[in-house]
Image (tube, rainbow, N blue to C red):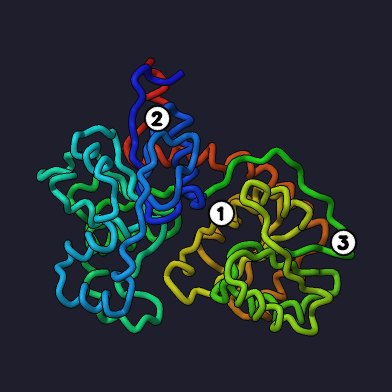
Amino acid sequence: MHQSKPKKALVVVRSNVAQDPRVRRQIDWLAEEGWQIDSLGFGSHPSSNVRDHFEVTPAAAWTQSWLGLAVIHTFFSYRARFRAFAEGQFPAEAARRVRAGYYDVVIMNDTHFLPWLSNKRVFGASPQAVRVHIDLHEWFPLEVGGKSRGKFLMQGYHAWGRRHIAHPVVTSRSVAGGAGPRYAQEFGFVEPAMVRNMPRFEQQSPSAVNPDRIELIHHGLAAWARGFREMVDAMRLVDERFRLTFMLAGSQQVIRELQDYIGEQSDRVQIVPPAKMEELAAAINPYDVEVMFFPPTTFNLETALPNKLFESVQGRLAMVSGPTPTMAAVINEHKLGVMSRDWTPQALAEAINSLAAPMVEQFKRNSDAAAKVLNAEHEKRAFFRAFGEDLDASAEVQ
C-alpha cells in the first residue's frame, strides 16, 4: 500500500525521455512507489507512468548555425545563452509548478539543463527552497569534448554550466560509476551516492555450454573506444573453440569499419543486429561469455560500471573483462568470470584461453544467482535513499 496522498516528482533530462533507459527506469521506480510523475525533456509523451510530459522543443535553427553560435557566444551573457539554447523552449507550466512548490523533488539528469537552477524566480532565492537531486551518472570533464571548431567559443559557457553541479539549491547527488570521489574532491560536497544502471530481473536459466564451441559476445554501442580492435586481435590468438559475436547498435560507419577490420576472421568473428532493450536478456542468453574490454583512455572508461555488465548478469553469462577496478570488484564479488592482466590483445587472449568449459558453466551458474540481487528492483532502494527517501519507512505510513 502507498500513502493516501501521493508524492510528486519532476524528472528532467536533455534527451528523448522515451528512448532513455536510465530515465525510464527512474520513472518506473517512482511509479511503483505510488508517486505522481511529470517529465521535462525532448520527444513526445514517454510512458503511461508519466502524467504530464513537458516537451522541450528544439532551439531556433539560427542558434545552431556557425554564425548564430559565434554571435551568441560572443555577445550573450551565460544566462542569455542558456535561455537561447534551452530554457526558452521549456513549457511555462513546468516552471510555474516548480515555483509553486508543487513537487516533492525535482530530479535533474546529467548537467545540460543544470543552469535552470540559477533562475531564482523558479527555484527560489534561498538555498534548498525546492528539493533537487542530480543524477550525474558519470564524470563530466572540465573541457569541451569533440573536435568542433567552436570549442574555444563554448568553453566558458561549458565551465559555467558545469559549476551548477555544486549549486546551493541542490540537496543530493548520485553517480552510476566510480566518479563520486572525484566530484567530492573537486567541489567539496559529500560524495554522491552510487545508483548503478541495472535492468529488470529476468526469469531464465543459463544456456548449455558446448566445450568445442564457446560463444563469446560483446553487445552495446558501436564505438572504437570500447576495445574493438583489441578484441578482434585477441581472436587471432585464442583457441579454435572460441567464436566472437558483436551485437552492435549506433554508428553504421563504425560497424562497417569494424567489418573491414575483421577481414579474414569472418569465419570466427561476426556482427549481428542489436536486440530491443526489453528483449536483450533473452537475446544474449544463448551465448556463453560477455567480453568487456575498455582501455582506460578517459576517466569514465577508467572507472566504468557499464549497463552491459548487469545486462550480462540478467542474460546469465560468464564474463571476461579488462582490469577496470570498478568492474573487477563486481565480477570478483559474485565470481562471474576472469580479468586480463593488462590492456593488450595478448593478455585478453590469455584470459579467454583460461576458460575451460566447466569454468564457464560455473560462472554462468554464479551469474544466475547474482541476477537475483543485481537488478533494477534491488537497486531501486539505492535510488530513493540517494535523495532522502527510505522505502521501508515510507511503507509504514499509510
Q: Residue at x 17, y 63 (%)?
A: 80
Q: Give, as a three-letter code, the residue at label 3.
A: Pro
Q: Nearer the viewer, mark 1 or mark 2?
A: 2
- Tell me the SS state at disc 3: loop
260 in relation to 75, above or below: below
Q: Residue at x 30, y 56 (%)?
A: 113
Q: Give, as a three-letter code, the residue at label 2.
A: Trp
Gap in angstroms between the C-alphas marked 2 and 3: 49 Å
Q: Which residue is mark 3?
A: 211
Q: Earlier in the sequence, mark 2 or mark 3?
A: 2
Q: Are marks 1 and 2 in contact (CB under 8 Å)?
A: no
Q: Residues within 10 Å of mark 3 (few under 14, many from 20)?
A: some
Say which quarter of the image contains residue 225.
bottom right
Q: Residues within 10 Å of mark 1 (few under 14, many from 20)?
A: some
Q: Are marks 2 and 3 in contact (CB under 8 Å)?
A: no
Q: Position of residue 131 (x, y in %)?
A: 25, 39
